[in-house]
Amino acid sequence: MIVLGIESSCDETGVALYNTAPWESGQPASLGILGQGLHSQVAMHRDYGGVVPELASRDHIRRVLPLLDQSLTEASLKLGDIDAVAYTQGPGLAGALLVGSAFAKSLAQGLKIPTIGVHHLEGHLLSPLLGPSAPQFPFVALLVSGGHTQLMLVKDIGQYELLGETVDDAAGEAFDKTAKLLGLDYPGGAALSALAEKGQTGRFDLPRPMLHSGDFDFSFSGLKTAVLNQVKQFEAKHITNADEVAQFHADLARGFVEALVAVLLRKSEKAIEQTGCQDLVLAGGVAANKQLRNALNASALKHGFSVHYPPIALCTDNGVMIAFAGALRMLQENNAATQSGSFDVKPRWDLVNA
Ligand code: ATP
Ligand code: MG
Ligand code: FE
């Protein structure tokens, strides 16, 4: 079965073609990726310091058809070879989701094939199965993206139990807001991570929020405020030496990353301990983060569990994870895909009840 995936929940237009045959015969899931196209709108939104919903929707419309052509060419396939269309149904920006939904449904109607609405976070959550080492069910998933930070117990495809989540900012959001405080362009997560590499450890002892809260919840807004306070104190000194300013930023970035990673690490270890799972998966944009990967790898080695990641390119939003999640749902439940023609999106949607 060839599934076309369409992602348009926020500021990336992603299109991909996925063949389920390798997965069905027990081969690595990544062999099913036949073609893909991705356009990030990051440069367009940068001047505004964040995503402008109306501009996002319009750009998805402009990009989606050329990306489909690109994917078909890469896969050496024709439209008639597609068996089903999976699209991101939610959560996300309503207008942006409507572009993907309208496109998917119209194309499917024309081709007389079924569609399946996919939960964006399920796309992120299952993407580690496309990585070099696949986890075994049940596993614990640490989902760290721009809009979410959750620890999940994944019993099977479609069976998700929420262990805990952030009560305020998401990890990616904390990265981006802190990056902005340190003068980095939006979205500054990756740049902040690189800056932290140049910093000294221990100069700033930042709070590790909810480290000992006894549950699996997170809070990152206080950490960001602690960074802001340090920035204000430093600015009050009116230091003009460029090297000193650069070192301050790098050291503070280091302190921020270490605090955030410490909390994510400890809670993930506890989730592994408490559930008795052998496998931990990391998913979402922050799964690309080097310091977090290093910390989890070291812990896994020490405590005897395994960690699995999506390929770096599939950590942030993309069409492959949507095609893949839609395909797995269709294989699992025979009637998961429908012929319905209505453009139904769910801007707010809880994965546990999806
Ligand atoms: P959601 O999936 O919750 O709806 P989203 O789709 O906007 O949110 P993703 O695309 O999964 O989020 O991830 C984007 C986030 O990942 C941004 O906040 C970005 O800064 C962050 N990010 C990407 N690479 C890195 C990195 N190397 N280190 C830290 N953060 C990173
Ligand atoms: Mg994005
Ligand atoms: Fe996402």
Image: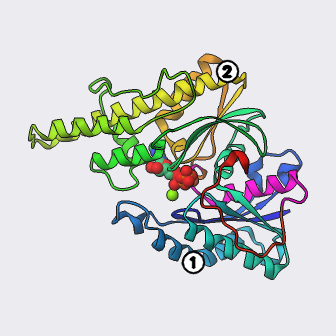
| Residue name at image x 83 percent, y 77 percent | 80
Mark 1 vs mark 2: in front:
2
The reply to whether residue 316 is in sight is: no
Asked if ligand 2 lies within 8 A of label 1, the reply is: no
Write down the residue under mark 1: 61
- Residue drawn 81% across and 53% down? 329
**Which of 172/79 is in front?**
172
Image: 296 above or below 182: above
Q: Judge whether 139 appears above or below 334 on screen.
A: above
**Magenta span:** 315-336
Element at label 2: helix
Judged left or right of residue 316, residue 179 is left
* Precedes in sequence: disc 1 or disc 2: 1
The crowd level at tag 1 (other Cα within 10 Å; few <14, some 14-19, many 20+) is some
Location of residue 128 in the rendering, given as x and y in whole percent from the top left corner: 67, 43
Of the pair 347 and 111, the residue shown nearer to us: 347
Residue 343 in the image: state x and y as whole percent. Answer: 70, 73
Contact flag, marks 1 and 2 (Cβ < 8 Å): no
Is residue 327 one of those drawn in magenta?
A: yes
Q: Main secondary structure of the magenta part?
A: helix
As drawn, is 336 to the left or to the right of 209?
A: right
For label 2, the residue is: 274
The residue sitting at 29% across, 28% down in the picture is 200
34 left or right of 300?
right
Q: Quadrant location of the N terminus?
A: bottom right
Of residues 328 and 334, the one nearer the viewer is 334
- Magenta residue check for 328: yes
